[in-house]
Image: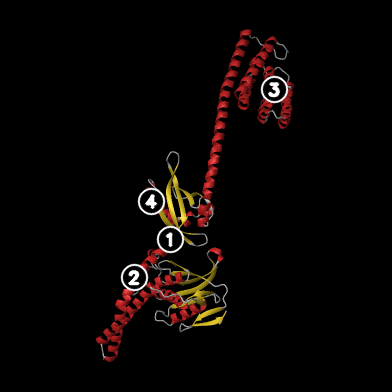
């Protein structure tokens, strides 16, 4: 209706303009004004009926029929057989075919043919006297009617065919759209239900989509993943795009390490496959991943336990075959050292023998302590007391140098349950390592933080021992807790292994962060006692005293 008003207003307005200015037709201009007013009035009636009528097909037939009548009137008053407005019949037939399909197109072509033929007969016989009959014969009228009727039905045939094809295509598209919508809904449900993270990337590694599990595992929203992918998945994706050839035949599986939004470092087990379309063209990569941090930690723990089992089977033999003869040998040498009057190189050699005998005894002692740890003597311990005492002992040890500064920031009220002597050994080993890692000058920081960590909101204490020393190479970080692994020229490689064992026996966790040239940070998490009646304090001599907390 809007298109009809706009089109006829333009045509009749143009015709009125030329009729006023140039008098191109003999009829009065007022006829055009009446015709335009009729169009506006009918449009208002159509608009009203559109809101009230339930039979839209009847309303469409009514409008098209009236349009054909109005076009016939316009053609008649603008010259009839010589009028150029007969083309409007074709527009009406096309619109009828679009709205009412092939049936509407044929009916509108039939009505147009009847009215056009009657109009030419009226003009030929000058029935109304409005349009003067030009000098043309009956055969010319018959030829003109034949040509226009042929064009009417041709337009009806073509537009009806296209309309039916469009309707059929629309139905098929609607059906496919419904199937696609069902498929998309099912896909969304599957992606939301899968517990594994799923990401898709383009060929440049840019993340294009992800499922809720991916957001949950990484801690980042889709927007953050998309904009910060190079920070979050940078190393993993770089490793992946270095193996794109491996994806052509089968998925490529690897482990990648990322930092979650809360700062935790997690290990992901990632499976990568090529993203292909229906034509088998590659458009990107699909990543399916899971958080396997706990699994890796469990495997590492089992591996250490297996190593411990092997070591334990040798411990008894080593203790029997080496330690007792070594004690006798050490005692005999010390007696000889006191009785013999050694000087010069002889005294120096005897000192070397005594020192190396003591060092060998220390190695065996640490070995046996790792292989056959003693049962924990658990007490309620004030953590700050152990740390303060250990720091004091460190400052008086030979490994502590003048260029080293120790800063202690410890919560004085944190209480844990454990073996005071074993925990002091943990802090001693870590602080000694920090001193040895600092070449000339540097700082060691000891701090505690009570945090909620783990299921059920259980209270845990985090102890951080950080130094500004030479750091640990990335390739060694996974090995530093292994027994007998050391980067020092003089060392047993059991110090950190014993530390890890003691922390595990206390139900805690120890992690390390380090970078070559920028220092090392050890994080120890231990469960704390939220309520305690008495707190055990280790004294300088190692005995336990108690005070009310």
Is label 1 or label 3 in front? 1
Percent x, y of residue 178: 56, 37
Give the residue number, with chain letter if any, for mark 2.
313
Front residue of 29/189: it is 189
Residue assigned mark 1: 296
Please name which of the two marks, 3 or 4, marks the residue nearer to the observer. 4
Front of the two marks 4 and 2: 2
Asked if residue 66 can be seen in this view, the reply is: yes
* Of the image marks 1 and 2, the number of the one nearer the N terminus: 1
Circle 2 packing at 10 Å, graded few (<14), some (14-19), many (20+), is: few
Q: Tell me the residue at 57%/21% (across/down).
A: 157
Residue at mark 4: 243
What residue is shown with label 3? 66
Q: Which of marks 1 and 3 is nearer the N terminus?
A: 3
Residue 59: % across, % down: 69, 26
Nearer to us of marks 1 and 2 is: 2
Local SS, label 2: helix
Query: Going 38% across and 51% down the picture, which residue do you hit?
Result: 243
Q: How many angstroms separate mark 4 from mark 2 (CA)?
A: 43 Å
């Amino acid at each position: 209706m809007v298109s009809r008003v706009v089109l006829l207003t333009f045509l009749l307005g143009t015709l009125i303009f030329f009729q006023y200015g140039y008098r191109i037709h003999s009829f009065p201009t007022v006829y055009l004004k009446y015709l335009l007013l009729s169009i506006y009035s009918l449009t208002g009636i159509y608009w009203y009926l559109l809101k009230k009528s339930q039979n839209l097909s009847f309303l469409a037939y009514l409008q098209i029929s009236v349009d054909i009548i109005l076009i016939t009137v316009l053609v008649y008053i603008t010259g009839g057989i010589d009028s150029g407005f007969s083309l409007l019949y074709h527009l009406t037939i096309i619109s009828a075919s679009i709205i009412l399909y092939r049936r509407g197109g044929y009916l509108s072509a039939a009505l147009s043919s009847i009215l056009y033929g009657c109009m030419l007969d009226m003009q030929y016989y000058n029935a109304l006297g409005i349009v003067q009959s030009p000098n043309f014969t009956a055969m010319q009228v018959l030829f003109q009617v034949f040509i226009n009727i042929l064009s009417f039905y041709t337009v009806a045939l073509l537009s009806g065919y296209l309309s039916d094809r469009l309707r059929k295509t629309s139905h098929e598209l609607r059906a496919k759209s419904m199937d696609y919508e069902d498929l998309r809904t099912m896909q969304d449900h599957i992606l939301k239900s899968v517990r594994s993270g799923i990401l898709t990337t383009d060929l440049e590694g840019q993340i294009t989509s992800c499922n809720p599990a991916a957001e949950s595992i990484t801690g980042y929203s889709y927007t953050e993943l998309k904009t910060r992918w190079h920070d979050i998945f940078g190393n993993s994706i770089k490793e992946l795009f270095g193996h794109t050839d491996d994806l052509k035949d089968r998925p490529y599986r690897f482990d990648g390490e990322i930092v979650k939004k809360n700062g935790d470092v997690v290990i992901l087990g990632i499976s990568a496959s090529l993203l292909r379309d229906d034509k088998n063209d590659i458009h990107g990569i699909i990543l399916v991943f899971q958080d396997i941090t706990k699994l890796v930690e469990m495997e590492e723990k089992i591996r250490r336990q297996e190593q411990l089992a092997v070591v334990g089977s040798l411990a008894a033999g080593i203790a029997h075959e080496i330690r007792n003869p070594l004690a006798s040998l050490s005692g005999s040498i010390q007696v000889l050292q006191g009785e013999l009057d050694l000087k010069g190189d002889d005294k120096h050699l005897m000192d070397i023998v005594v020192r190396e005998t003591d060092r060998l005894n220390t190695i065996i002692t640490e070995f046996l302590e790792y292989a056959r740890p003693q049962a924990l003597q658990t007490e309620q311990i004030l953590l700050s007391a152990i740390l303060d005492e250990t720091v004091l002992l460190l400052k008086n040890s030979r490994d502590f140098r003048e260029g080293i500064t120790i800063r202690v920031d410890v919560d004085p009220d944190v209480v844990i349950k454990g073996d005071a002597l074993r925990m002091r050994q943990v802090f001693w080993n870590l602080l000694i390592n920090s001193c040895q890692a600092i070449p000339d000058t540097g700082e060691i920081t000891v701090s505690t933080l009570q945090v909620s960590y783990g299921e059920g909101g259980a209270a845990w204490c985090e102890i951080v021992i950080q130094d500004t020393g030479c750091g640990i190479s990335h390739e060694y970080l996974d090995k530093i807790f292994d027994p007998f692994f050391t980067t020092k020229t003089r060392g047993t490689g059991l110090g950190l292994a014993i530390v890890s064992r003691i922390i595990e026996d206390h139900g805690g966790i120890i992690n390390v962060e380090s970078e070559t040239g920028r220092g090392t940070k050890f994080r120890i998490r231990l469960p704390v006692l939220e309520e305690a009646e008495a707190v055990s304090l280790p004294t300088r001599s190692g005995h336990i005293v108690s005070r009310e907390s």
